[in-house]
Amino acid sequence: MFESITQSLGKAFSAFRGAGKITEGNIREGMQQVRQALLEADVAYDVAQTFINSVTQKAIGEEVLKSLRPEQQIVGIVHQELIDLMGPVSHSLAIRREGTSVIMMCGLQGSGKTTTCGKLATRLKEQGYSPFLVAADLQRPAAIEQLKIIGAQVGCPVYSEDPQNSNPVQVCRNGVAAAKRSGAQVVILDTAGRLHVDDGLMRELQQIDSLVAPDQALLVCDAMTGQDAVNSAKAFNDALELDGVILTKLDGDTRGGAALSVKAVTGVPIKFIGVGEQLDRLEEFHPDRMAGRILGMGDILSLYEKAKKEFNEEEMLRQQERMQKGKFTLDDFRNQMRQIKKLGSMRDIMKMIPGMGAMVDQLGDMNPEGELSRIEGIIDSMTMHERQNPEIIDRSRRNRIARGSGVDAADVNKLLKDFSMMAKMMQGMSNMGLRDRLRMMKGLTDGGFLNPGAEIVEKKLRSGRGPADKDAARDKKKKQKKEAAKAKKRNRRR
């Protein structure tokens, strides 16, 4: 997510590091690079210009110019401006305490609107509400059937009518009436989309808005369309007065232009983001956390919430009791790996842990999931007795385990050595809360324990072959050339 802008901003900020005294000229030059990074990320031109003017004005203040670490203060200013740019946000859906609340979903075809209706219904059901879906998209073939399938997966009723003998306004009105009779608390209207914004679509939505009077009107936008998403958001808001935006496919958006521009251009906040195809992959949008991700600071709070939701609490308590007794085994470790896999890809998890974003870039084409599967395969090749008592594994057993898992005996030996050190640390973590454990994970990976590719990354860092090292080396060389040229000129004058 947002890899391009994160790398570009990192490169722009590197101009302030090691520059000696920061001057107003340094700041303006660096801000031009930040501006370029924003435009390359498909941020709206006016938004990028206003953002840079605001950051520059604050960055040339006395406190920054006289600071011992001005680059940190500049990053802090950019961080706060990003938060202000995307926020504030209220995640409230204005659900009534009594009666039936109506949420109208709208958007262009291909934005993921129908799937997002199912995601929102899933979220509401998890919160204890009884959702009710209305199939009012009579424009797109198979949209009604798709919503029925999603409704069955969520476990909530779906109202529909024959497209040949009805119209979207009638379907919405009848659907809300049916939902009230059934006692549903929240009705979600899946309205029709178009391939592009047109007058017919807007008139239809305005009629639904007028006759049904929804409590919330939410626009579903495809984040990967960049400025097109922002333009469509502006058009829909001009016609309907939207209450919020849901950005879909954000996990595939490397630029981030839509997320950074929507609020500034339309005044409408992004309430939720879609980060996967599964129906439970709808998250609240937090500007402060997103700003942290964009600047490579991680997002430990979102990771904590995700872990709290995905981890098996009973299994965690059982393992905690075992760790307190000094009984953390390879079996326990394998179970923990399987729980961690539920959080998503290892690259995404690592990016959410502060200080580990750079390590992800150093991994290159390596596949962390494949490495974890390899470790799991080694453990699976052990007997139950060996998993619970790894100290009994001698050379003969190591060779057998290596053959069974298709790896070298040295790999088995490294796993056992790392696990021995890790078991002691895990015992120390037994009395920590979940958030502290996630922070402790950074310490484990920094130590290279059971960290796929850690040795390769370390070698790259030492040899200066990583991307960050190449940039630093190139910048240093340029600086040396400039200094040499200046010295040459001074000598000539003498």
Image (spheres, grey):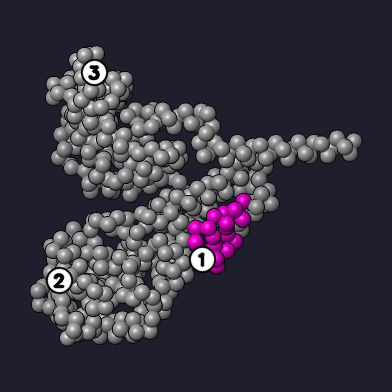
Q: What main secondary structure does the magenta stretch of the protein show?
A: helix
Point 64% across, 37% down: residue: 476
> Which circle, 1 or 3, is nearer the viewer?
3
Q: Amino acid at mark 3?
A: Arg
Q: Sequence order check: which comes first, mark 1 or mark 2?
A: 1
| Magenta stretch encompasses residue 40 | yes
Query: In this rendering, is residue 250 above or below 310?
Result: below
Q: Contact, CB < 8 Å: mark 1 with mark 2?
A: no
Residue that mark 1 sits on: 44
Q: Farthest residue toward the left? A: 182
For the record, the magenta segment spans 30-53
The answer to which of 454 and 350 lies nearer the viewer is 454
Q: Which mark is residue 398?
A: 3
Q: Secondary structure at mark 2?
A: strand
Residue 487, image x and y in percent? 80, 36
Residue that mark 2 sits on: 158
Q: Contact, CB < 8 Å: mark 2 with mark 3?
A: no
Residue 246, image x and y in percent? 34, 65
